[in-house]
Image (spheres, rainbow, N blue to C red):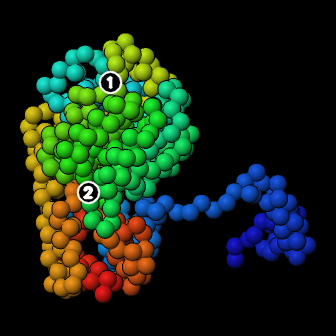
């Protein structure tokens, strides 16, 4: 028998007497009443990551998670890219000591991020008007950028697309900015509500922050055309707006250069630009939290001051970024062979997603001749705004164990040759 030690009378007597039991309950009630956290309310689960928790507890062997934006290979695994594996071996072989990194992160990494975003031949990079800080993923870059705009520049409002990545709202409002939306997606045409978007942008006050998805719009998969980007950049310049480009999926829409074209367009026309980038998806380094925040200022002197403020913001937030994740990306990007291998692997991921888009739309066309899902093949990146209603999404989850975000967003990158028929069948059943 396990002896129970009574915390009230301090006897190890094998049982707790009813009197001691009563006293102990009274004491714990008293503690509860005095707890500083007793009024804390239960927060709703995250609309995207909360789904992964639900998915994990589902026992259906055929379950499919189309919720979170993660690329899975054709066997349903998150890939460890070969270029990353090789880079990791090189890093480990060096057995480096782990002192603190500079507040703004690894200098060489930051330079390599700049070449990827602005082009290796960019003359702009020689002007020292751009500073980059290694951040904790794209989310970290968004938060540091938002803090900078709110606390240092004094901005009050940000405008995000309707719809946008679910976390944009929370990140910017946590930074103290008022979050507004500009029209973006038109469900009737499954395209951009461009006239309304333009009308709204033209009405924004000076110094309003406009958050734009540089490529592979999350959640819709619908990007602006090159002509539309020209119009948008002109408005940004005319109205004196502050453009904040979120580029988390570079290389998933088209080539790295094509997906980065919007960044370069903004640098040609604007004085200022804020960019958050992420390597979670393109390097399959989700859990390593690796990204960057780049800010373009009017002059080199201004950039220096901006950098000093960023360092203050980072220092009082998480002090400095970790070594390993930056070293992985740096090692790949700095080595021409590894970089070529990365571009190759990224191309493979992009092409596989395109094939899945085609397979899904072809299957649904066969199963549901009345439904036209061909728009899925036109969308770019990991996501598709499927047009499924919230009720259909819930049905999909509860009756078929296929998980999608309630907005109807599906992550096409989680489809594979073994589950695409199952998913097509499930979608066909809920839309019938
Ligand atoms: C997504 O949109 O699903 C991804 O960016 C993952 C995340 O953090 O939400």
Residue 358, placed above or below residue 257: below
Residue 66 location, x and y as percent? 32, 68
Q: Position of residue 200 (x, y in %)?
A: 40, 46
Q: In this view, does 294 lie above or below 7?
A: above
Residue at image x 40%, y 66%? 407
Q: Is residue 198 left or right of residue 34?
A: left
111, above or below 46, in the image: above
Q: What element carries label 2?
A: loop
Q: Where is residue 214 in the image (x, y as percent from the top left)?
A: 27, 44
Q: Decide which of tag 1 and tag 2 comes sooner along the chain.
A: 2
The residue labelled by disc 1 is 271
Image quadrant holding the C terminus, namely bottom left
Q: Can you say which quadrant of the picture contains the N terminus? A: bottom right
Image quadrant of residue 423? bottom left
Evaluate whether residue 175 shows in this view: no
Occupied quadrant, residue 388: bottom left
Distance Cα–Cα, label 1 vs label 2:
27 Å
Q: Which residue is drawn at 80% across and 75% down?
A: 15
Residue 194 visible in this rendered orientation of the protein: yes
| Left or right: 297 as drawn, with respect to 76 | right
């Amino acid at each position: 028998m396990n002896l129970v030690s009574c915390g009230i009378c301090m006897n190890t007597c094998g049982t707790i007497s009813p009197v001691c039991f009563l006293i102990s309950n009274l004491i714990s009630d008293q503690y509860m009443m005095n707890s500083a956290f007793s009024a804390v309310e239960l927060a709703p689960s995250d609309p995207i990551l909360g789904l992964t928790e639900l998915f994990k507890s589902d026992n259906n062997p055929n379950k499919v998670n189309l919720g979170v934006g993660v690329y899975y290979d054709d066997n349903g695994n998150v890939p460890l890219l070969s270029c990353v594996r090789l880079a990791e071996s090189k890093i480990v072989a060096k057995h480096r000591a782990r002192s603190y990194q500079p507040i703004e992160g690894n200098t060489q990494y930051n330079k390599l991020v700049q070449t990827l975003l602005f082009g290796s031949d960019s003359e702009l990079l020689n002007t020292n008007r751009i500073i980059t800080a290694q951040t904790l993923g794209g989310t970290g870059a968004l938060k540091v950028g938002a803090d900078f705009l709110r606390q240092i520049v004094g901005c009050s409002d940000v405008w995000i697309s309707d719809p946008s990545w679910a976390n944009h709202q929370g990140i910017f409002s946590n930074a103290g900015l008022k979050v507004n939306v500009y029209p973006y997606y038109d469900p009737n045409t499954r395209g951009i509500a461009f006239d309304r978007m333009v009308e709204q942008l033209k009405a924004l006050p000076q110094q309003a922050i406009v958050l734009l998805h540089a490529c592979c719009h999350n959640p819709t998969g619908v990007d602006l055309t090159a002509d539309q980007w020209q119009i948008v950049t002109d408005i940004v310049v005319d109205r004196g707006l502050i453009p904040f480009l979120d580029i988390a999926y570079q290389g998933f829409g088209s080539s790295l250069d094509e997906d980065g074209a919007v960044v370069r367009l903004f640098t040609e026309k604007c004085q200022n630009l804020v960019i958050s980038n992420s390597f979670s998806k393109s390097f399959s380094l989700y859990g390593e939290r690796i990204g960057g925040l780049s800010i373009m200022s009017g002059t080199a002197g201004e950039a220096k001051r901006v950098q000093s403020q960023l360092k203050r913001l980072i220092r009082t937030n998480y002090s400095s970024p970790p070594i390993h994740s930056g070293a992985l990306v740096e090692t790949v990007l700095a080595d021409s062979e590894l970089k070529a291998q990365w571009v190759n692997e990224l191309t493979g991921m992009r092409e596989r997603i395109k094939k899945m888009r085609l397979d899904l739309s072809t299957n649904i066309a066969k199963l549901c001749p009345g439904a036209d899902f061909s728009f899925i093949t036109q969308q770019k990146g990991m996501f598709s705004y499927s047009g499924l209603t919230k009720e259909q999404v819930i049905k999909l989850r509860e009756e078929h164990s296929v998980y999608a975000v309630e907005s109807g967003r599906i992550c096409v990158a989680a489809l594979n040759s073994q589950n695409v028929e199952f998913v097509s069948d499930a979608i066909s059943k809920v839309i019938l």
